[in-house]
Image (cartoon, rainbow, N blue to C red):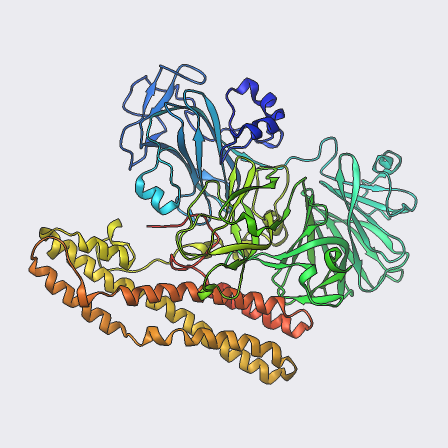
Amino acid sequence: MIFTEKRTRVRRLRGFPALAAAGILMAGMLFINPVSAAEQNLLKNPGFEDATSGADTLPNWATSAESMGKATFTDKAAHAGQQSVAIPAHSAIEQKINSASPGAYVARCWVKSGAEQPVTLLLQDTGRPWAAYTCAEIKVPRDQWVQIEAFCALDRAGSLTLTLGGMSKEFRFYHGIAGEMGASIMADDFELIRYEPKPPAGLAPLAVWDAKKELPPIFDWSDKDQWSRVEDPTHTFAGTPVLLGRHLAGTVRKNDGGLVISALQAGGLKPRCVVVPSVPLPAPKCTLVQANGRTGIRVSSEAGDRFYTAWFAPNGLISVEANQIPQFQVRECRLRYGLLPSFAGTDLCYSPSKLPGGKEISIPSTQWFVGLVDGNDSMLVAVWEADSQAVTLGLSGEGEHRLIDSLSIVTEKNGFSLSFVEHAGLWHQEALKEDWLGEYVPVGWERPFPARWMSHFFVTPGGQPSFRKPWMDYSFPIADAKTRIWGVWFEDWNHYPFFFDGPRTVFHFEKTFIPNGEALIYFLQPAAADLYSPCEIVEQALGQEKAAALFDFDANRLRRLKYSTPGQFLYDRPVCATTTRLSKIRQAEKPTVGVDLATHLYEFVREIRGRIDQYVAFFGQVQGYLASEKTAHPELRDYLTELEGMVAEAQSKSKEIYATPLSSVQKKTEAMKKVLQEGRGDGFECGDLDVRGTAGSQDDLCRHYNRVVMRMAQTAALKCGDSPAKAVIAKHIWDQSRAVLREPTRWESRRTLYFFEP
């Protein structure tokens, strides 16, 4: 969305449907509720008043290195104050914040353009762009001040660099955006704001009451004025205990000691789940407990030999510790979908309507689970302390009405935590239609707030299946620009399947991937909204260090290849690009640059061969593991045989690659060097010395193996439901898969929109 003047921002927002109909919503722009924003602007000299008009230097700002012109201050026009900055065509300015805390950030600025054209707003941690990166390409009108925005989340303390203007041709080529800023712009009133959730209005973030009587399962929240506020840290409850942690209220029911959890919405309560001990605690004794700065309630049996403690935190986290209670069930949670997220590879999605018959299924113990609650306004986040704790899902209903209605967690040695994320439009399911093929289709869901939104979807291939066989069912981040996609998830240079046009969500499918099935849209990381994200909840439950190891965002960093050639950008190219460069080389450069490029050809092939070696070693290890499990568990033969078949198919693909030894590639490149050193005329034709065939086969095999590994993990996890022993095997394959998928080559898929790293 764009805004023409600050004083009309609210009025224009209220007229949003009219704006959308007029077709002026732009990618990367969205109004943010100022109530949830921290007001501190992290940028220095954001209004460009700290300088002399026309000066050659920009205090606190810099013209980007690849710019074709130099940005200067100007007093000819300003959005506010006396000055703004003038940015020439094909140029950009930037400012770096060296110290930024983890969290959600929104960058805004006002732009006035000399022509209707695209402008790029880039926000990233340049040290870790694979984890923190947003590139928004925004079409702005001519001769009109408009405000544009971009969002980025940091998973750890780092830096943030904001860049505005026109990006170089090479940047646009590798980052997927197509627009070129061919006319100058003026920019003013920049801001970079970090968003934090606010405590509930009119309520303490943590409060405890004794109702002095037994409350029904559903009661009126306004009755709290009749309850007794508990201050005594050792209080024993005479009636129903009521605890409030931020937006979640908990009460203990009398018949079994179950903890009833409801979400506080607009002054009322909305039931979310009941945490039930596997050993009932009828007529429980409830006592307030405080320790190490925490407040909770101890729910014990009449004899006092069995009990659990539910700790309530001011941020809405509820943590359960058990004594002599082997298991808990989170019942009545009414989940349409269940997710086992993974930032290395892809999320695993459990759709109740697609799961096999039965009332209970085992899942891999991945330590966190996200449930998409029926009604689209809530997400359950469950976190358990150890991956040795067995976890199962309970199902109810039939067909399209089938739900995940419970989550069971073993608590013999360790506890667990849970919370609910609450917001309208928090997740969305969209049925994909084949007649969308080739079209750009806005779907009936608009993002309610800026976040790194994901879409998990199912498609079928349009052509020969090749490495995509038999289907695709993966998680993609939604782009903030109409973006080209590399031949990574799909073959050919297709356009990315999802992007935001303002708050609107646009789907696009091409002939190589036909829409069929459904897409889920959800978010996991910190967002610019008044809520704690699923990732933040996991950090609160496990601590930052354990959570960071579990997330492993750095798994998405591209593999660093090792060359003996100089550390210059032009040498870090795939074999095809390097060969093209050689074909145009001038005679004078052949003995120097040409020889380096020929050396690079071999070293590039050598390094990618090393990646294939990793995959081959992985498949060998999995093969041995499955064979040992088949001996130990003959009753799991069919399950293990299917996985063994996937391993065998993968292993067969490497025979052709290894038929060409690296020594033969090196021999060809050494022969190239001799010819280049002779330096006869401009240009170079590899002829019989060409190594592109070997290089291309290796690249494709990396891409293929990347899919096979993810598909194996999906298959193991989605077919282990009838056996806890299978779930243990699925968890092992999950762990090993995440390890081998780390730091892929540029032809392999990864959970990022940052397509290229020099």
Q: How many marks?
A: 0
Q: Quadrant of residue 693?
A: bottom left
Left of 48 or right of it: where is 729?
A: right
Work out whether 471 lies above or below 94.
Answer: below
- Give coordinates of residue 756: x percent, y percent: 37, 50
User: At which x and y percent is residue 300?
Assistant: 84, 58
Does 273 sit above or below residue 146? below
Q: Is residue 384 left or right of 656 when viewed as pictured?
A: right
Residue located 58% across and 69% down the image: 716
Name the foreground residue: 205 vs 680. 680
Compare residues 682 and 272 and report the one nearer the observer.
Answer: 682
Q: Is residue 543 above or below residue 37?
A: below
Out of 325 and 601, give the one closest to the viewer. Answer: 601
In the rendered view, tell whether residue 38 sits above or below residue 706. Answer: above
Q: Residue at x 51, y 27 (%)?
A: 2
Give percent across and percent down for residue 650: 45, 73
Rendering coords of residue 757 (x, y %) = 36, 50
Left or right of residue 24, residue 208 in this image: right
Q: Residue furthest right?
A: 213
Q: Name which quarter of the figure residue 142 lies in.
A: top left
Any part of residue 487 in sight: yes
Residue 621 visible? The answer is no
- The residue at 64%/46% (across/down) is 427
